[in-house]
Image: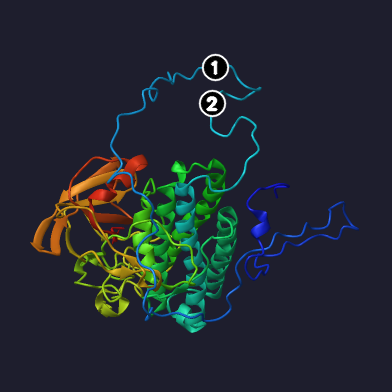
Amino acid sequence: MLSKINIASGLLALAPIVNALPQASYISASATNVQPPVPAPPVRSSQVTGVTTHGPFSGTPTTTGALTTDVLAASIPMLPPNPTATTYPSDGQLHNPEPAPYTPAGGLGTNGTEPVYNAKSDFDYESLAVALYQEWIELDLFHDGLARFSAEDFEAAGLTAEDRFLIEFMADQEVGHSTLLSNILGAQAPVQCTYNYPYTTVREFIDFCQKLTRFGESGVYGFLNHLDSREAAQLLLQSITTEARQQTIFRQFDGLFPFPVWFEAGIPQSWAWTLLAPYISSCPANQTRLAWQNFPALTIVNNPNPARINANNTGSNEFVAFPLSNGSSPLNETLVPASDSCVNSTIVGESCAPGITRNRSIPLSFPGRQLFLQWENPGQGVGPNLSYVTSTTAGAPQFVAWVTQLNLTYSPLTLTSNNTGYTFQPDVSTFAGDPAINGTMFVALTDANITFTAFNLSMINPHVRAGPALFQSG
């Protein structure tokens, strides 16, 4: 435990406090030299013990649109590399005096200055705030599934009491994550809201969790190394690595291969907010608003259904309508005929029962697979109190952008109407032996096929016509 940490610690008492963390066991101090336990810092959120309020928003928004101020330009210009970007010789030798023994010169935050764990720019605050919205919904979501379904429901889906306890513990982890980010942001940090979820069965709940944790994790990777506050980035890194473990666990519960990729993708904040916002029904009237964009929803009409033995048989709209998939809707297991259901199969290569790993004989997707796409027009109310409005600055869609692992790949979009079209899955690898399109990854519609990389992917936003949507490619 750090003896001194400047994370706006005076704000710990902003909300009802309970100690929701597991208590350590201590051997009697009379028998050993172990000191009595140090009082644990309080947490910001309360422990959820039953079904909380959920459902769609039915009122009228009093504020609309994202938070904004004076805008200096329509987009960030593309510039050449910094002139010094390639001057370091990178030859394995030391080229500058060491500031201390065993301490090579360079690095950020390495000059001995005491760290202060706060937001240091608008970019920092807005990025950490959307991450906090994500932590709050995960805290509620994991508890909601446990409260909504009975022990018998979970057991019928192949999940035991120990599995349910693991989900409960993951919810408790979100108490710590939301407390951490709230303390970094200070008094105006976003608070927990009311949510609306699409699932109706345990299997759909698990699939929704693996999708939501996917874009939550990737949403942080997209901005983490751009934060001005390196101190806050350090703590967020130690939080998001826990989320990566959660995503793997939900994939295992979903009967999927735990991590079928060599690298995890990062996405821009506006992509993560676009996927998250539709599940937030309402927030308190004085809730801090976000500056990020909400893009029009994109639907993969024939998104592979991992509840099938052969996902190539997936029909149209085999997801839980909400009322239209916003790109991250869970699988719909009720539409899968018993003859093609992998849930109860005991055959190796077919079974998708919960397990440490599953290796499908028939992959969920493959290069050349045709994807049918449908998208909304801008101007739709979404998010808390329907107070955010979808928008785009892009022209007519011409390409499908595939964001997966380290890659941004484009494929041509063939229009079949103003708001429908199709494309084919590209055959591309990150490195030899690692097919890039795998796992739960992202697609979006764009008006151009401009090259961007993992570090500057947010520059694609002015060209996004709709999306992203999550593609269940593996």
Residue drawn 27% across the image and 45% down it = 408
Q: Which residue is mark 2?
A: 106
Rendered location of residue 121, percent (x, y) = 49, 45
Q: Is residue 149 visible?
A: no
Q: Horizontally, is 191 left or right of 32 in the view?
A: left
Q: Considering only vertical position in the picture, is 281 above or below 88?
A: below
Where residue 104 sits, quadrant-wise, is top right
Q: Which mark is residue 153?
A: none
Give the CA separation, mark 1 to mark 2.
9 Å
Helix, strand or loop at label 1? It is loop
Rendered location of residue 196, percent (x, y) = 40, 76
Callout 2 amino acid: Gly
Q: Which residue is mark 1?
A: 96
Where residue 208 sits, quadrant-wise, is bottom left
Q: Crowding at label 1, few (<14), some or many (≥20) Cα neighbours within 10 Å?
A: few
* Structure colour scheme: rainbow
